[in-house]
Amino acid sequence: MTHVTEHPLVQGGRSTALAAACVRGGLAAGLGLGGLAVLVVAAWISSPHPDSGPGGALHLAAGLWLLAHGVDLVRTETLSGVPAPLGVVPLLLAALPVWLVHRAARDTLDAGDGGDRPRPSASGAVAGVAGGYLLVAAAVVLYSESGPLPADLVTAGLWLPAVVVGAAGAGVWTALGRPLPGQREAAVALRAGGLGLVTLLGGGAVAAAVSLAWHAREAQTAYAGLAGEWSGRVAVLLLVLALLPNMAVWGAAYGLGSGFALGTGALATPLGLAGDPAVPPFPLLAALPAEGPGGWLHWSAVAAPLAATVLQGWRVGRSARSWAARDTALTALGAAWGCGVVVAVLAGAAGGPLGTGRLSAFGPVWWQAGAATVLWGVCVGVPTALGVRAWGRRGLRPKPLPVARQVQVQVQVPVPAPPAASVTASAPPSMAGPGAGATAPGAAASAPGPASEAASASGPAPGSVPPSAPERPASEEARSASDLGIDDDPYGDSAFEPYDYLPAAWEPSPPPPPAAG
């Protein structure tokens, strides 16, 4: 009866939790779209010569919101009349929707901890949040089809769900305490790959910043030529800020050696800039290297992947001091592959088409950047991991134990005195005379009678064990001899003792001397 009563309550609680997760996903999509729309409308209001009405501003906001999710846009209004694609994603602009989805999924699981409200499962939270978000995204895609920047339906059906589900999964993982795989090799590979990725992107950002500072005059000229009014300059400045993470990815790809494309006929690598680049006037593009072979300043960008793979291998080798060499190499290889996959995804988002013709390929090529990352990890990361492991195993070798000194301990065992032989002589009554009582005590003790002779001749009693003198250590014998003042044995017997001349109890006594007269 209890099971039947609780079952509808449990089902109702789960349905409520999934509905709440779906609402959270929709609110996250609305907040991201609304925040971007506020910025676009504010720029439109502040513009002295707006090209379109509020409808055009809202369509532009919808297009930028979809572009932040990796959806390609199509520019229908071009000078040639041919639609031109736009696929370069401002990565900083993508941070807002990704963070909103992540937080919605995290709060969905954390909501039931402090109260009595039901909480869905992990898969239910991901499905509910992603479902609510994608419902709003589908409406935005349909709305953008009537504007100047419609969404490409192929990329909208591919990248938009992938980004939303990935961000929701990351939020659930955070709510569960960021657990790592139970296998130690997988956990170490993830940590090492993350360390290498952060180091690689940081080095790419430094290389790009140095190059931009080197070409500061060209960048200022391009910035001033794009817009003359302050509202236009603010818009360009916001776009530059949104593209700064793209600049870091471009710098990382340049240091990896795969470089990036500047149109269909130009490629920039540390070896130099080959081909005829098709570069539009933009402040960040002023940091591109000049045409011709590269010098030592261009080759210094190689320090970014070198440092990243060394740290990656060091992280693996430090954790693998007690592992086998094969497991260490496989873990370092797994870290290289993980880092390469993430770099390929970021390179694909940071680059893309800017138009048709020569501008159809612009930025890093995703598969080349990913393959170069894996190659650096194999050539540098794996040997570094093995070397760090070998160096760390030096401290794990057992040290030889100190040899204990042999101490000789002399134990003195007390030796009991040997039993004294007491022999009593008795004479027959017929032979007792007046002089019998005058017999000396010593003579009476040493002269055995007939009874004692019979006892001596018969030997010990049956069943009795004859007593034996206990053995004494040589040190005790030497001490006894020295106490008695005997330095050397005159008979050459080292076992000679002063009491050895006494007869034992079971030995026959010598016959008494015959009495005189």
Image (spheres, rainbow, N blue to C red):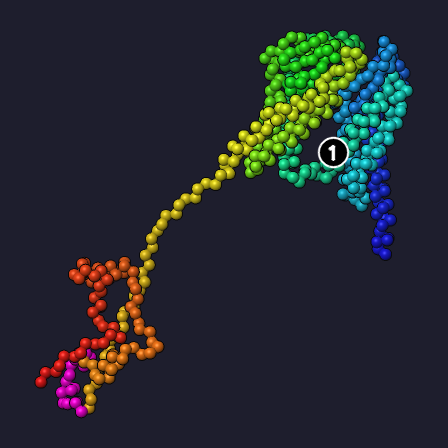
**Count of picture labels:** 1
Quick check: 368 above or below 273? below
User: Label 1: few (<14), some or many (≥20) within 10 Å?
Assistant: many
Q: Quadrant of residue 114?
A: top right
- Which quadrant would the N terminus be assigned to in this image? bottom right
Q: Secondary structure at mark 1?
A: helix
Tell me if residue 138 can be seen. Answer: yes
Q: Name which residue lies at 31% across and 72% down.
A: 467
Q: Position of residue 435 (x, y in %)?
A: 13, 87
- Which residue is pictured at 67% across the width and 29% down the height? 338
Q: Nearer the viewer, residue 173 or 490?
A: 490
From which residue to which does the magenta span run? Answer: 430-446
**Against 455, is 5 above or below?**
above
x 54%, y 30%: residue: 387
Residue 125 x %, y %: 80, 38
- Which residue is disc 1 drawn over? 170
When the figure is inspected, residue 29 is found, relative to residue 500, above or below; the finding is: above
